[in-house]
Image (spheres, helix red, strand yellow):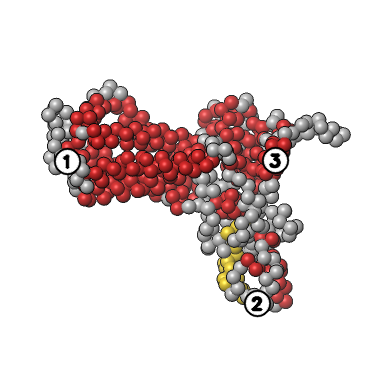
Amino acid sequence: MNRLVRLFRTSIGRKLVVAASGVLLLGFLVVHAAGNLLILKGPDALNGYADWMQGHPLLWGFRLGLLGLFGVHIVTAVRLAHANRAARPVPYRRIARLGARLPGRLMVVSGLLLLAFLVFHLLHLTARVVAQSGNPLLDDAGRVDVYGMLVAGFSQPLIVTIYLGAMALLGLHLVHAIEGMFQTLGFNHDSYQTLIRVLAPLLTLLIVGGFAAIPLLVIGGHLHGGG
Amino acid sequence: MEFTLHIWRQHGAAEHGAFVTYPVRGISPDLSFLEMLDILNEELVGRGEAPIAFDHDCREGICGSCAMVINGDPHGPLPGTTTCQLYMRHFQNATDITVEPWRARAFPVLRDLIVDRSALDSVIQAGGYVSVNTGAAPDAHAITVAKQAADAAFEAAACIGCGACVAACPNGAAMLFTAAKVAQLAIMPQGRPERSRRVIGMVEAMDDAGFGNCTNHYACTEACPKQIPLRFIAQLNREFLSAALSSREFVELARPHAHEE
């Protein structure tokens, strides 16, 4: 039997799929957050970056790759969760209060809510079909004015609330995900366990903070419209 | 002391069970939890009722028989303790105590608090041993073991196979048990030759037995009466991945199919 086929039929193999796709998605989030923060350097930097990406020959390859990663991550995790529910057909009358903290128990819920947010986010800022008034404007250099679009979008309290809520969910998801990822991939040793315990919330905070900073800065009046 | 007990009663594997409430009075704080149940059972037998069935054997905290979930905690509220080593002084007087069997698809209830834990045996049978030749006892120094390896293996070998990890896990997973049993042998030189075959067999047997999948909640290690550390689960993941990616056995050995007895 093929090694990989046999591996992905086992519980550990399936969890490796979730962890490995999660690592790649985490990498995407870091790059995405870093790219977003170009907004702090002003309209020219952000619009130039967006323009470079839009014209990149690998844009669609990258998008399809991401779609595949999300697909594999979500489908495998939901299948595992389904099997896990079946492994305890009769529930306890009194729930074991040991271990099992809330972020871990809510992984599927936070993940699926994030998927709903992802759809909204793509419709909002990529397809630009919701909560956007009129067509995308162009800046002075003839590029799509991403800066202006963000400032206009995040000037609406409802939109800001949705984005901040989603970032709270992302934090809830990542704080368990990052710690669990190391364990599933086999990195757990007394000599660096403390490092992982610190790294998981720290990396979560950096990513979530990086994303949440933009709507907060816009609604707080620190970033102004106009290219 | 006095308590109101809510205990799961179920006459047989195929029958429906329900909680039955039993008040107990005049309980000495120095009775163990099992002795308290013994006293209740004496009363029940005296009244012509069926006693509450529960597993127990050594009553010294080393056999792993006394499986029951007490107020939502496998082996009760005291960390690192089996039910037999739990005393009534660990409870508040005049409170309600809920007692349930281990709940997992792989552990069907046989009667009252007794579950069938042979699913754990099937994991052991799939590789939790070393093959040695019979004959004269080997020379004590024939294989030298480093002190660190001996200590690490002993930490894993402290597992008494009670199944509290499965009972505590929100997914009913047996990863901590399997990890301890794989690690105790993988760490020792005697376990090296069968290392790949062992981890492949035991993980696949664990999956076939109907246990859930680990999602890193770590409730297992907190419930474990022997406090088996979590790093053995990471070691199991490493051992399995390495065997899956590089061992001959993973390609050549057929996967045995789970069969019902």
Q: Up-down: is A51 above or below A116?
A: above
Q: Chain of mark 2?
A: B
Q: Position of residue A222 (x, y in %)?
A: 21, 43
Q: Which residue is mark 3?
A: B151
Determine contact: label 2, label 1, CB under 8 Å.
no
Q: Which residue is mark 1?
A: A224
Pointer 3 local density, CA inside 10 Å: few below 14, some 14–19, many at least 20? some
- Name the kind of residue labelled 2 in the image: Arg
> In this view of the protein, which residue sits in the foreground, A16 or A90?
A16
Residue B141 locus on image (x, y percent): 81, 32
Tag count in the figure?
A: 3
Could you say whether the residue bearing mark 2 is in a helix, strand or loop?
Answer: loop
Residue shown at 22% from the left, 27% from the top: A48
How far apart are the alpha carbons under marks 3 and 2? 45 Å
The image quadrant that residue B26 belongs to is bottom right
Residue B25 numbered tag: 2
Which mark sits nearer the N-terminus, 3 or 2? 2
Question: Amino acid type of disc 3?
Answer: Asp
| Residue at the spot 18% in from the left edge and 38% down from the top edge | A149
Crowdedness near tag 2: few (<14), some (14–19) or many (≥20) residues, C-alpha within 10 Å: few
Which sits in the foreground, B51 or A221?
A221
Q: Position of residue B58 (x, y in %)?
A: 75, 57
Quick check: B139 left or right of A123?
A: right
Distance of mark 1 from mark 3, alpha carbons? 63 Å
Image position of A103 (left or right of B32)? left
